[in-house]
Image (tube, rainbow, N blue to C red):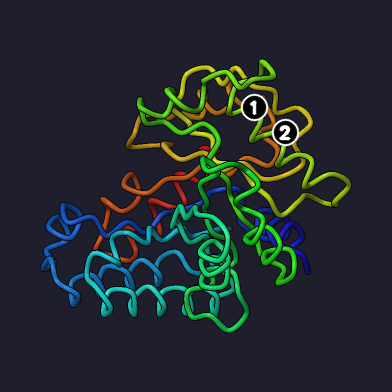
Amino acid sequence: MTFGERLTKAVAAHGPLCVGIDPHPALLDSWGLSRSVEGLERFALTSVEAFGGRVAVVKPQAAFFEAHGSRGVAVLERVIADLRDSGTLVLVDAKRGDIGSTMAAYAQAYLGDGSPLAGDAVTVSPFLGFGSLQPALDTARATGRGVFVLALTSNPEGEQVQRATAPDGRTVAQTIIDFAAARNSGISPCGDVGLVVGATIGETDVDLSGFNGPVLAPGFGAQGGSVADLKRLFGADMRGVLPTSSRDVLKHGPDVSALVSAVRRVQQSL
Protein backbone atom coordinates (compact mmCIF):
# COMPACT_ATOMS: atom_id res chain seq x y z
CA MET A 1 0.00 0.00 0.00
CA THR A 2 1.00 3.62 -0.43
CA PHE A 3 1.84 5.71 2.62
CA GLY A 4 -1.46 7.56 2.24
CA GLU A 5 -3.39 4.30 2.26
CA ARG A 6 -1.57 2.99 5.32
CA LEU A 7 -1.99 6.26 7.19
CA THR A 8 -5.70 6.41 6.37
CA LYS A 9 -6.12 2.86 7.64
CA ALA A 10 -4.20 3.61 10.86
CA VAL A 11 -6.24 6.74 11.60
CA ALA A 12 -9.49 4.85 10.98
CA ALA A 13 -8.39 2.22 13.51
CA HIS A 14 -6.90 4.43 16.24
CA GLY A 15 -7.88 8.05 15.59
CA PRO A 16 -5.58 10.85 14.38
CA LEU A 17 -3.32 11.25 17.43
CA CYS A 18 0.44 11.17 16.88
CA VAL A 19 2.48 10.64 20.07
CA GLY A 20 6.10 11.72 20.32
CA ILE A 21 8.93 9.85 21.98
CA ASP A 22 11.17 12.68 23.20
CA PRO A 23 13.79 11.42 25.68
CA HIS A 24 14.56 14.93 26.91
CA PRO A 25 17.01 14.97 29.83
CA ALA A 26 14.38 16.57 32.09
CA LEU A 27 11.94 13.76 31.29
CA LEU A 28 14.59 11.15 32.03
CA ASP A 29 15.01 12.86 35.41
CA SER A 30 11.27 12.89 36.10
CA TRP A 31 11.08 9.17 35.31
CA GLY A 32 13.90 8.48 37.76
CA LEU A 33 16.25 7.43 34.96
CA SER A 34 19.89 8.30 34.43
CA ARG A 35 20.95 10.65 31.62
CA SER A 36 22.76 7.78 29.94
CA VAL A 37 22.22 5.36 27.08
CA GLU A 38 20.76 2.92 29.60
CA GLY A 39 18.25 5.53 30.77
CA LEU A 40 17.48 6.46 27.16
CA GLU A 41 16.83 2.84 26.26
CA ARG A 42 14.56 2.25 29.25
CA PHE A 43 12.59 5.41 28.47
CA ALA A 44 12.26 4.63 24.77
CA LEU A 45 11.28 0.98 25.11
CA THR A 46 8.76 1.76 27.86
CA SER A 47 7.21 4.29 25.48
CA VAL A 48 7.10 1.69 22.71
CA GLU A 49 5.34 -0.74 25.05
CA ALA A 50 2.74 1.90 25.93
CA PHE A 51 2.11 3.34 22.47
CA GLY A 52 2.73 0.46 20.07
CA GLY A 53 -0.52 -0.80 18.57
CA ARG A 54 -2.56 1.89 20.36
CA VAL A 55 -2.04 5.04 18.27
CA ALA A 56 -1.92 5.76 14.56
CA VAL A 57 1.57 7.28 14.49
CA VAL A 58 4.51 7.48 16.88
CA LYS A 59 7.15 10.16 16.32
CA PRO A 60 10.58 9.54 17.88
CA GLN A 61 12.68 12.73 18.01
CA ALA A 62 16.01 11.70 16.48
CA ALA A 63 18.08 14.44 18.14
CA PHE A 64 17.65 13.05 21.65
CA PHE A 65 18.95 9.68 20.48
CA GLU A 66 21.81 11.16 18.42
CA ALA A 67 22.96 13.09 21.50
CA HIS A 68 24.17 9.75 22.91
CA GLY A 69 26.28 8.90 19.89
CA SER A 70 26.28 5.59 18.07
CA ARG A 71 24.74 3.71 21.00
CA GLY A 72 21.88 6.19 21.09
CA VAL A 73 21.30 5.79 17.36
CA ALA A 74 21.22 2.02 17.91
CA VAL A 75 18.39 2.58 20.43
CA LEU A 76 16.53 4.63 17.81
CA GLU A 77 16.93 1.79 15.33
CA ARG A 78 15.41 -0.63 17.83
CA VAL A 79 12.53 1.77 18.55
CA ILE A 80 11.75 1.98 14.84
CA ALA A 81 11.89 -1.80 14.42
CA ASP A 82 9.78 -2.55 17.50
CA LEU A 83 7.11 -0.01 16.59
CA ARG A 84 6.84 -1.34 13.07
CA ASP A 85 6.58 -4.90 14.45
CA SER A 86 3.63 -3.67 16.54
CA GLY A 87 1.89 -2.42 13.40
CA THR A 88 2.35 1.24 14.35
CA LEU A 89 3.43 3.83 11.79
CA VAL A 90 6.74 5.51 12.64
CA LEU A 91 7.46 9.12 11.75
CA VAL A 92 11.15 9.83 12.37
CA ASP A 93 11.45 13.47 13.40
CA ALA A 94 14.86 14.27 11.92
CA LYS A 95 14.12 17.49 9.97
CA ARG A 96 16.75 16.76 7.35
CA GLY A 97 17.42 19.17 4.50
CA ASP A 98 20.33 19.48 2.10
CA ILE A 99 21.12 19.40 -1.62
CA GLY A 100 22.20 16.91 -4.26
CA SER A 101 24.00 13.75 -3.24
CA THR A 102 23.84 14.69 0.46
CA MET A 103 20.05 14.89 0.37
CA ALA A 104 20.03 11.61 -1.54
CA ALA A 105 22.04 10.04 1.29
CA TYR A 106 19.61 11.37 3.90
CA ALA A 107 16.75 9.99 1.80
CA GLN A 108 18.36 6.55 1.70
CA ALA A 109 19.00 6.61 5.45
CA TYR A 110 15.46 7.56 6.51
CA LEU A 111 13.34 6.32 3.60
CA GLY A 112 15.30 3.60 1.83
CA ASP A 113 14.40 -0.06 1.94
CA GLY A 114 16.81 -1.97 4.15
CA SER A 115 17.98 1.03 6.19
CA PRO A 116 17.65 0.47 9.97
CA LEU A 117 16.75 4.17 10.37
CA ALA A 118 13.88 4.06 7.87
CA GLY A 119 10.49 4.37 9.47
CA ASP A 120 7.30 5.02 7.54
CA ALA A 121 7.96 8.73 7.11
CA VAL A 122 10.46 11.45 8.00
CA THR A 123 10.29 15.20 8.63
CA VAL A 124 12.28 17.35 6.19
CA SER A 125 13.21 21.03 5.87
CA PRO A 126 12.49 22.79 2.54
CA PHE A 127 14.36 26.01 3.25
CA LEU A 128 17.10 25.32 0.71
CA GLY A 129 14.29 25.35 -1.84
CA PHE A 130 11.49 22.84 -2.26
CA GLY A 131 13.33 21.33 -5.22
CA SER A 132 16.20 20.34 -2.94
CA LEU A 133 13.84 17.74 -1.43
CA GLN A 134 13.49 15.85 -4.72
CA PRO A 135 15.66 12.87 -3.67
CA ALA A 136 13.53 12.40 -0.55
CA LEU A 137 10.28 12.83 -2.46
CA ASP A 138 11.35 10.31 -5.08
CA THR A 139 12.62 7.76 -2.56
CA ALA A 140 9.44 8.03 -0.50
CA ARG A 141 7.28 7.50 -3.56
CA ALA A 142 9.37 4.52 -4.68
CA THR A 143 9.32 2.79 -1.28
CA GLY A 144 5.76 3.57 -0.20
CA ARG A 145 6.85 5.98 2.53
CA GLY A 146 6.05 9.60 3.32
CA VAL A 147 7.69 12.94 4.04
CA PHE A 148 6.40 15.76 6.24
CA VAL A 149 7.67 19.14 5.07
CA LEU A 150 8.09 22.04 7.49
CA ALA A 151 5.71 24.82 6.46
CA LEU A 152 4.58 26.92 9.44
CA THR A 153 6.39 26.05 12.64
CA SER A 154 5.52 27.27 16.12
CA ASN A 155 8.91 28.77 17.05
CA PRO A 156 8.83 32.61 16.97
CA GLU A 157 11.94 32.79 14.77
CA GLY A 158 10.22 30.82 12.03
CA GLU A 159 8.13 33.82 10.98
CA GLN A 160 11.25 35.58 9.62
CA VAL A 161 11.42 33.02 6.82
CA GLN A 162 8.07 31.28 6.63
CA ARG A 163 5.88 34.40 6.52
CA ALA A 164 8.28 36.35 4.29
CA THR A 165 6.98 37.27 0.86
CA ALA A 166 8.33 35.44 -2.17
CA PRO A 167 8.90 37.29 -5.49
CA ASP A 168 5.47 36.24 -6.79
CA GLY A 169 3.69 37.77 -3.76
CA ARG A 170 2.93 34.53 -1.92
CA THR A 171 4.42 33.84 1.48
CA VAL A 172 7.22 31.30 1.62
CA ALA A 173 4.90 29.02 3.60
CA GLN A 174 2.26 29.22 0.88
CA THR A 175 4.77 28.32 -1.83
CA ILE A 176 5.78 25.25 0.18
CA ILE A 177 2.13 24.26 0.60
CA ASP A 178 1.45 24.74 -3.11
CA PHE A 179 4.47 22.65 -4.14
CA ALA A 180 3.37 19.89 -1.78
CA ALA A 181 -0.21 20.07 -3.04
CA ALA A 182 0.98 19.72 -6.62
CA ARG A 183 3.02 16.65 -5.68
CA ASN A 184 -0.07 15.04 -4.10
CA SER A 185 -2.48 15.96 -6.88
CA GLY A 186 -4.78 13.15 -7.97
CA ILE A 187 -3.59 10.62 -5.39
CA SER A 188 -6.25 8.78 -3.40
CA PRO A 189 -6.98 8.63 -0.49
CA CYS A 190 -4.21 11.19 0.13
CA GLY A 191 -0.70 11.95 -1.01
CA ASP A 192 2.61 10.96 0.54
CA VAL A 193 3.79 14.53 1.10
CA GLY A 194 2.58 15.95 4.40
CA LEU A 195 3.05 19.33 6.01
CA VAL A 196 4.12 20.45 9.48
CA VAL A 197 1.93 23.29 10.77
CA GLY A 198 2.23 24.13 14.47
CA ALA A 199 -0.90 24.03 16.61
CA THR A 200 0.16 27.20 18.45
CA ILE A 201 0.94 29.52 15.52
CA GLY A 202 -2.12 31.75 15.93
CA GLU A 203 -3.46 32.40 12.43
CA THR A 204 -2.20 30.40 9.46
CA ASP A 205 -2.74 33.10 6.80
CA VAL A 206 -2.34 30.37 4.18
CA ASP A 207 -4.69 28.44 1.96
CA LEU A 208 -4.79 24.72 2.75
CA SER A 209 -8.06 24.07 0.92
CA GLY A 210 -6.44 22.34 -2.05
CA PHE A 211 -3.97 20.31 -0.05
CA ASN A 212 -4.45 16.56 -0.47
CA GLY A 213 -2.20 15.23 2.25
CA PRO A 214 -1.73 14.86 6.01
CA VAL A 215 -0.88 17.80 8.27
CA LEU A 216 1.20 17.18 11.38
CA ALA A 217 0.22 19.66 14.11
CA PRO A 218 2.83 19.65 16.91
CA GLY A 219 2.32 21.72 20.05
CA PHE A 220 -0.95 20.11 21.12
CA GLY A 221 -1.15 19.69 24.91
CA ALA A 222 1.79 20.77 27.06
CA GLN A 223 2.88 23.49 24.61
CA GLY A 224 -0.53 25.12 24.84
CA GLY A 225 -2.35 23.94 21.71
CA SER A 226 -5.98 22.96 22.33
CA VAL A 227 -8.72 21.20 20.39
CA ALA A 228 -10.28 24.64 19.87
CA ASP A 229 -7.01 25.89 18.35
CA LEU A 230 -6.90 22.93 15.99
CA LYS A 231 -10.47 23.46 14.82
CA ARG A 232 -9.87 27.18 14.35
CA LEU A 233 -6.77 26.54 12.27
CA PHE A 234 -7.89 23.57 10.21
CA GLY A 235 -11.70 23.49 10.26
CA ALA A 236 -14.24 21.67 12.36
CA ASP A 237 -13.70 18.20 10.87
CA MET A 238 -9.85 18.48 10.97
CA ARG A 239 -9.68 16.04 8.08
CA GLY A 240 -6.10 14.89 7.53
CA VAL A 241 -4.77 16.63 10.66
CA LEU A 242 -2.55 14.64 13.02
CA PRO A 243 -2.45 16.41 16.40
CA THR A 244 0.85 15.65 18.10
CA SER A 245 1.32 15.29 21.84
CA SER A 246 4.62 14.43 23.49
CA ARG A 247 5.32 15.86 26.95
CA ASP A 248 1.63 15.97 27.87
CA VAL A 249 1.56 12.18 27.58
CA LEU A 250 5.15 11.36 28.54
CA LYS A 251 4.92 13.16 31.88
CA HIS A 252 2.79 10.25 33.10
CA GLY A 253 5.65 7.74 32.82
CA PRO A 254 7.38 5.52 33.68
CA ASP A 255 4.28 3.47 34.54
CA VAL A 256 3.02 1.85 31.33
CA SER A 257 -0.61 1.75 32.43
CA ALA A 258 -0.50 5.47 33.27
CA LEU A 259 0.95 6.24 29.83
CA VAL A 260 -1.77 4.15 28.17
CA SER A 261 -4.45 5.96 30.17
CA ALA A 262 -2.99 9.33 29.18
CA VAL A 263 -3.08 8.35 25.51
CA ARG A 264 -6.70 7.26 25.78
CA ARG A 265 -7.69 10.54 27.42
CA VAL A 266 -6.12 12.56 24.63
CA GLN A 267 -7.66 10.34 21.94
CA GLN A 268 -11.11 10.80 23.46
CA SER A 269 -10.68 14.59 23.51
CA LEU A 270 -10.16 14.83 19.76
Q: What residue is at 60 percent from the left and 75 percent from the top?
A: 112
Which of these two is toward me, 24 or 164? 164
Q: Position of 180 compared to 72: left or right? A: right
Q: Which mark is residue 178?
A: 2
Q: What residue is at 37 percent from the left and 31 percent from the top?
A: 155
Q: Position of 238 compared to 270: left or right? A: right
Q: Amino acid at mark 2?
A: Asp
Q: Which mark is residue 174?
A: 1
Measure how far apart labels 2 and 1 are at the Cα level.
6 Å
Residue at the far right in the pictured view: 186
Residue at the far bottom in the pictured view: 114
- Residue 221 lies, with reference to residue 192, above or below; the image says above
Where residue 20 sits: x, y (%)? Answer: 41, 54
Where residue 161 sits: x, y (%)? Answer: 47, 27
Q: Secondary structure beneath disc 2?
A: helix
Alpha-carbon neighbours of circle 2 within 10 Å: few (<14), some, or many (≥20)? some
